[in-house]
Image (cartoon, rainbow, N blue to C red):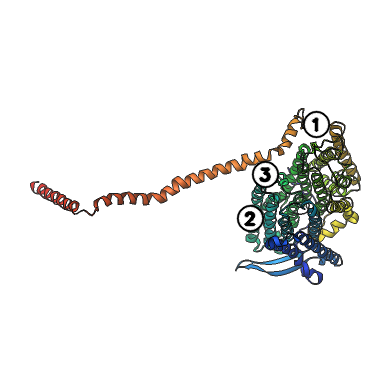
Amino acid sequence: MNTVILSAAEHVPVVAPTEASGVFGLMWLIIALPALGAVVLLLGGRRTDAWGHLLATALPIVSFVLGVAMFVAMLGRAEDDRQVGQHLWTWFETSDLSVGMDLLLDPLSILFVLLITGVGSLIHVYSIGYMAHDPRRRRFFAYLNLFLAAMLTLVLADNYLVLFLGWEGVGLASYLLIGFWQHKPSAAAAAKKAFVINRVGDMGLSTAIMLAFVTFGSTSFAVISAGAPEASETTMTILGLLLLLGACGKSAQVPLQAWLLDAMEGPTPVSALIHAATMVTAGVYLVVRSNFVFELAPAAQTVVVVVAVVTLLWGAVIGCAKDDVKKVLAGSTMSQIGYMMLGAGLGVAGYAFAIFHLLTHGFFKANMFLGAGSVMHAMDDDVDMRRYGGLRLPMPVTFLTFAMGYLAIIGFPGFSGFFSKDKIIETALAENLLVGSLALLGAGITGFYMTRLMLMTFFGKRRWRDGVHPHESPAVMTGPLVALAALSVLGGVLILGNWISDFLTPVVGHAEHAAPPIPAWAVSVLTVAVVAVGVTGAWLMFGRRSVPEAPPEPHGPLGWAVTAGRNDLYGDQINDTLVVGPGATVTRTVVDVDKHVVDGVLTGGPVAVGAIAGVLRRLENGYVRSYALSVLTGAVVVIAALLAVNLA
């Protein structure tokens, strides 16, 4: 495949930020407040059980208010004066490297701050009701606060090392939250799986940071950006590929996607937090933040596009085959993150649209995950959609709010996803017809699997288990659903007047976009038509027919696809064959060599000395008669030798 990037754009160096003052001087508090909540709840112990969850919810809300104040203040500044830095302290310093605990607030990071704290706060509020009867609720809220603090550190970092600190903090918090119910073997295994796979990606990011230091003598975004044009294209390509490896781990992109569906073992608010506002968006942020690397490494950009297209289709196929409502949404997340990575891979033409879709996805996916949690709450934690049906009547608020998210994700005209995903498809068609066509196909599959989910859950005959009595969730859970549903509908306003592209221009640059092969309005019509085909197919298969209690055996030309989808497209098997199996073989070989060769060499000398000592020990036994016999024997030998010499 030829290099995808066709739009011409100049390298946009990172502008040195101005020192924080005024409301920007409180930037550190955005991170410190949720971090404080985690410390208080973890160290306070049972004394905080009664009110800890309230404190943990209030602190991110205050961070959100601070973020809004800084956003408003930023809008009041000139376009070239919207990069604000804050030096907290010198983290460490050597003769060759000085790294400060420095923060950077610019148009890119402020959007992430608002998403993380805004949606994160709503998830905290929802969790008050969802986790009300969990005996370890206080610890759960502490982990949520830790998660937000780590993610905020990641997006507010001024250099790659501070970013890596937040990156690892997110990894730790995700491990704690995915395995929160560690009494379940499946949850403990899922947490370990997510942790290990993410370490593979983290090796890529850490190696990229070391390469950046060796090449540029710094880990600062501004310094690396300024020196990037002087580096060789080979160096920039390697740096870009290493950064992409890190992004694939956090954002569950092929080939490091296998952990994502297992992560559903955590409480549902965790799924909403990981899949909407925090962890899986970190990889997209890394690529867009590192635009000064990828713009000078077109081969690495092409790899980003290839990975994105494969992932958006991979996740969509998985979403079609699952009966677990959360795993359908998890496959959907993988696919939608693929769209964001596609936008990022398209370079200057797509950076802003990648972030635009990231924001709208944060709204409608958090809405749907929390809506799924509301359904589970009503169905005694049952996640199998084959045992749902007809839930729109006993759960009207959950149904209506979930429907807003559904219409947004399939790209129904007027809803947020219609604007954000369509812009990525339009840009992809303009840059490369094959890539754009595959992205369009993904939109049709999205319409199919999301309509399937809606029909199996909220429509049709009631298939509830005996003893289950669905009911609407309490207001503390439905309130956040209403807020997120409103954002799912209205999120598209960010594109009005091309606002989001203009706002992000100081960070990602600007280029004249290539025109798609057909007019932009025709792209929208075509996309809606393709989605309509997917919706119609789902209606014919699941709306007009009864849903069997057990999934039927797959047959026909698509039977293999259904089987593969139910097995996550054999992601685990591929990993076992290509990585785990060979890795175990190498490990066993190394252990055997160490045991039988290395240990043999090291221990062989002492063993020989010991054997000789054993022989000598018999001669030095302490008996006088033995010594007399030895003397006599020696004398006889000497006399015999002398006689032999004389006779000769």
Name the residue carrying label 2: 207
Name the residue at the bottom extreme. 21
Q: Earlier in the sequence, mark 3 or mark 1?
A: 3
Give the amino acid type for the residue marked by disc 2 in the picture: Thr
Q: Position of residue 223 (x, y in %)?
A: 70, 64
Q: Is residue 529 left or right of residue 607?
A: right
Residue 68's x, y, as percent?
A: 84, 63
Q: Which residue is mark 3?
A: 186
Q: Amino acid at mark 1?
A: Pro
Residue toward you, 576 or 552: 552
Question: Mark 3 falls on what kind of element?
Answer: helix
Task: Say left or right for 529 vs 59.
Answer: right
Q: Quick one: which residue is furthest to the top in this view?
A: 556
**Among numbered discs 2 and 3, the one appearing first in the sequence:** 3
Q: Say if residue 138 shows up in the picture.
A: yes
Instruction: Please tell me in which quadrant of the rendered image residue 329 appears.
Output: top right
* Number of other residues with Cα within 10 Å of mark 1, as a class: few under 14, some 14 to 19, many 20 or more: few
- What is the C-alpha distance between the residues marked 2 and 1? 51 Å
Q: How far apart are labels 3 and 1 at the CA level?
A: 27 Å
**Category of crowding for the residue at label 2, using alpha-carbon neighbours closer than 10 angstroms: few (below 14), some (14–19), many (at least 20):** some
SS for callout 2: helix
191 or 1: nearer the viewer: 191
How far across and down, in percent of the image, does residue 502 sit? 85, 58
The residue labelled by disc 1 is 548
Q: Is residue 308 left or right of residue 201?
A: right
| Front residue (pair 486, 113) | 486
Q: Nearer the viewer, mark 2 or mark 1?
A: 1
- What residue type is disc 3 on? Ser
Residue 47 is tagged as none
